[in-house]
Amino acid sequence: MTMRLDYLSIFPGYFDVLDISLLGKAVDNGLVEVHAHDLRDWTHDRHRTVDDTPCGGGAGMVMKPDPWGEAFDGIIGIEPDPSVHVIFPTPSGIPFTQSAAQELSTVERVVFCCGRYEGIDHRVIDYARTMWTVHELSLGDYVLNGGEVAALAITEAVVRLIPGFMGNPESLAEESFSPGQERLLEYPLFTRPVSWRGMDVPEVLMSGHHGRIAEWRREESLLLTRDRRPDLTD
Ligand SMILES: N#Cc1ccccc1Cn1ccc2ccc(-c3cc(N)[nH]n3)cc21
């Protein structure tokens, strides 16, 4: 299966980076197909206007609905199709999680709608919900200037889970937040040299005793999780 990814933004250049590294390889081997679009291509005025003042007053500007609607018509189509997943990154979205990434990794088509300014006219999202499967997703409780960086983060989390993308899929199964894994943070990792700037790799890891190593790693994960993410231990 090839996943088609479309990105709608006034800064489509953000997505040039998808030609690099593992994602570039996924494109080369046909696992994913990437298309970035400039929202301004669907404006008709001399200034290629995409924003206007908010109805009801307030600070900043809001993205006009018209360019989005015309871009949807051109990129996705005018017929409803629930198999198309449309993602609006937004600070007011539901938290994006590994399980959401897992679900999205099985989808054939994803369209990222990257807003700017103070956000997109709400009717755009309401319209999209009548046509496709819509996800309003937040990366976390902090505010970015637009949806592009969030779209890149979601893309990476999703595409790496597509079967055939990662060289060693077994490593995915062991990761924190993977299904079936206890919700613990990753234990500290070490590699050679065994001694570096007066600091040594913990002896247990050099013991070859797999039972003790597993026990040490679990204990370290429990301590780290309790200290940094007590919410995961509920
Ligand atoms: N909306 C909005 C908004 C509201 C207040 C202040 C600034 C913005 C900027 N902005 C415009 C589009 C857009 C998309 C996603 C995020 C976003 C996601 C996470 N998790 N943080 N920030 C922000 C975005």
Image (cartoon, helix red, strand yellow):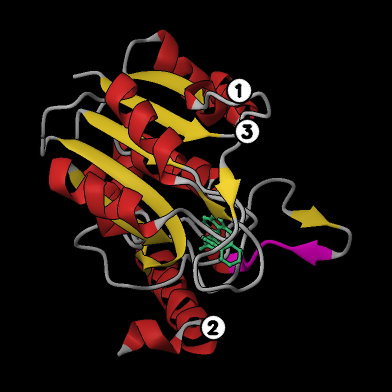
Question: Tag on residue 16?
Answer: 1
Q: Is residue 212 above or below residue 83?
A: below
Mark in front: 1 vs 2: 1
Q: Residues within 10 Å of mark 1 (few under 14, many from 20)?
A: few
Front position in the image: 110 or 47: 47
Q: Residues within 10 Å of mark 2 (few under 14, many from 20)?
A: few
The residue that appears at 47% across and 65% down in the rendered structure is 186
> In the rendering, at what x and y percent does residue 166 appear?
37, 30
The residue that appears at 59% across and 26% down in the rendered structure is 45
Front position in the image: 29 or 137: 137
Asked whether the viewer can see residue 168, the reply is no
Q: Secondary structure at mark 1?
A: helix
Upstream in the sequence, badge 3 or badge 2? 3
Circle 2: residue type: Arg
Upstream in the sequence, badge 1 or badge 2? 1
Q: Quadrant of ligand 1?
A: bottom right
Q: Is mark 3 within 8 Å of ligand 1?
A: no
Q: Which quadrant of the figure contains the C terminus? A: bottom left
> In the rendering, at what x and y percent does residue 147 appear?
53, 49
Question: Tag on residue 228?
Answer: 2
Give the side of residue 103 with respect to residue 223, left or right: left
The residue that appears at 17% across and 46% down in the rendered structure is 133
Q: Quadrant of residue 4?
A: top left
Front position in the image: 180 or 24: 24
